[in-house]
Image: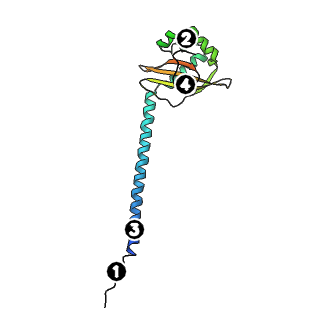
Amino acid sequence: MTPNPVISLPLAPLFLAEEVPHLLFYLGAVLVSLLGSLVLIWIIVAVRVLVSSRGMTTALNNFFAAIVNGNYGAAYGMLTPELQGELSAKDFKEFVKTQGLRQYKRLELPLVEVEAGRCPLDLTVELQTGQMIDLTLDLVRVEKTWLIDGLAMGKSAETSPKAS
């Protein structure tokens, strides 16, 4: 009697079938790790943006609230001394009136990018009339306070130091 030959062909699919769950487990672990890393990076970036722009929204709200209430002196006080040196209080008041900013209703604040305590902003301001106007502000952080260092109508990558 001759021994039965061992057929290796059926063993190969069995071997692969046994390995598939292990491969799927490792593939799943890799995908979860990648997703976790992306979420962690997103959280870090979000925290950096929030920390670097802390107080900016309050400063903008205070600036426009002063204008709406006709308190031009308080709004002018939120400009940097450098901008105040280039733009008189009278010219500032005229700029605000001419552009209709006293009719401020709300603004669309874009994602901010703060570099070395400076933040250029291209804002879309909605007036009470429903009109939308573009306004560019250049904010600077002086100690813990945000001040306006540039003010111009329209959108641009860089703000003008004077109101235009």
Question: For the residue labelled by badge 3, is the local secondary structure a helix, a strand or a loop?
Answer: helix
Labels 4 and 2: the sequence-earlier one: 2
- Label 3 neighbourhood size at 10 Å, few (<14), some (14-19), many (20+)? few
Q: Residue at x 41, y 71 (%)?
A: 13
Residue 107 location, x and y as percent? 59, 26
Tell me if label 3 and label 4 are in contact, CB under 8 Å. no
In the picture, the quarter occupied by the N terminus is bottom left
Labels 3 and 4: the sequence-earlier one: 3
Residue under pointer 2:
73
Q: Nearer the viewer, mark 4 or mark 2?
A: 4
Question: For the residue labelled by badge 4, is the local secondary structure a helix, a strand or a loop?
Answer: loop
Name the one closer to the observer, 91 or 2.
2
Q: Nearer the viewer, mark 3 or mark 4?
A: 4
Q: Residue at x 41, y 45 (%)?
A: 37
- Label 4 neighbourhood size at 10 Å, few (<14), some (14-19), many (20+)? some
Residue under pointer 1:
6
Q: Residue at x 42, y 60 (%)?
A: 24
Query: In this image, 64 relative to 80: left or right?
Result: right
Tell me if label 3 and label 1 are in contact, CB under 8 Å. no
Alpha-carbon span between mark 3 and mark 1: 18 Å
Instruction: Give the amino acid at mark 4.
Output: Ser
Residue under pointer 4:
156
Question: Residue 16 has which mark?
Answer: 3
Q: Nearer the viewer, mark 2 or mark 1?
A: 1
Instruction: Give the amino acid at mark 1.
Output: Val
